[in-house]
Image: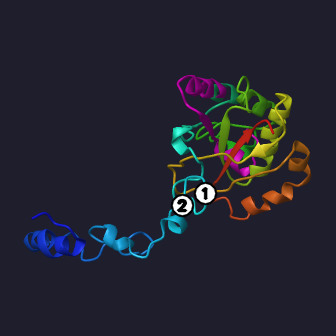
Amino acid sequence: MPITSKREWLQGPYAKAIERSPERAKVFETTGKMPVEPIYTQDDLRDWDPNSKLGFPGEYPFTRGIQPTMYRGRFWTMRQYAGFGTAEESNQRYRYLLNQGQTGLSVAFDLPTQIGYDSDDPMATGEVGKVGVAIDSIEDMLTLFDGIPLDKVTTSMTINATASTMLAFYVAVGKHQESPRKARRHGPERHPEGVHRPRDVHLSSAAEHAAHHRCFCLLQGYGPAVEHHLDLRLSHA
């Protein structure tokens, strides 16, 4: 006779299997310390209301995703963490990645840029352009995104103390490209680095970036050991 209930399976095939060969651990848990059962069936869904607990795509509680169409509409943004040498060299790399099908950019800055040193500062010796691109001025940022339409390509920036400066540069580049001056959070996106803490930023104009840079004190307060992803797209309102 086929097994028709969870209890029957646990007391039958499952019990015999672990008697012959015990499981790796006595208790299995999620990272949040919630116990994980060997199997889940409809028996675990008694008194469970799908309308309030599951809902519909794009609707609270967003169990089925934050957009009605999710990946049927578009894939998540795919980016390769990239940046090295000069702004011109990194620009060439970005154009290559986009031509190969990448759908967004993830900018790696060198260590002097991340902590606010110009490339010609003695403290920057030996580190310029090594683990990311060197950005010293708005001219460098213009070169970095030359030929890349910021109203169509999303940009993730991994940055530390100079986050407000790099973001102001970025918005100024968008203004130079005649893209509407609006920086928006954009997703969905996967950050495989894991150790970085995401900080999404939304400001409405280049003027606000300059006049209200104190908004970024939140970003800088974590110290240089913490990196922040600024996931931005300059797009039409």
Say which residue label 1 marks. Answer: 59
Q: Are marks 2 and 1 in contact (CB under 8 Å)?
A: yes
> Which residue appears at 55% of the width and 31% of the height?
102
- Residue 163 percent across, percent down from the top left: 74, 50
70 or 26: nearer the eye? 70
Q: Seen in the image, is 84 located left or right of residue 64? A: right
- From this viewpoint, is residue 58 visible? yes
* Picture quadrant of residue 154: top right
Q: Is residue 45 above or below residue 165?
A: below
Residue 55: which numbered mark, if any?
A: 2
| Callout 1: SS | loop
> What distance separates the C-alpha of mark 2 from that of mark 1?
7 Å
- Which segment is the magenta one? 91-119
> Which residue appears at 77% of the width and 44% of the height?
183
151 or 4: nearer the eye? 4
Q: Please, what is the three-letter code of the amino acid marked with disc 2?
A: Gly
236 or 157: nearer the eye? 236
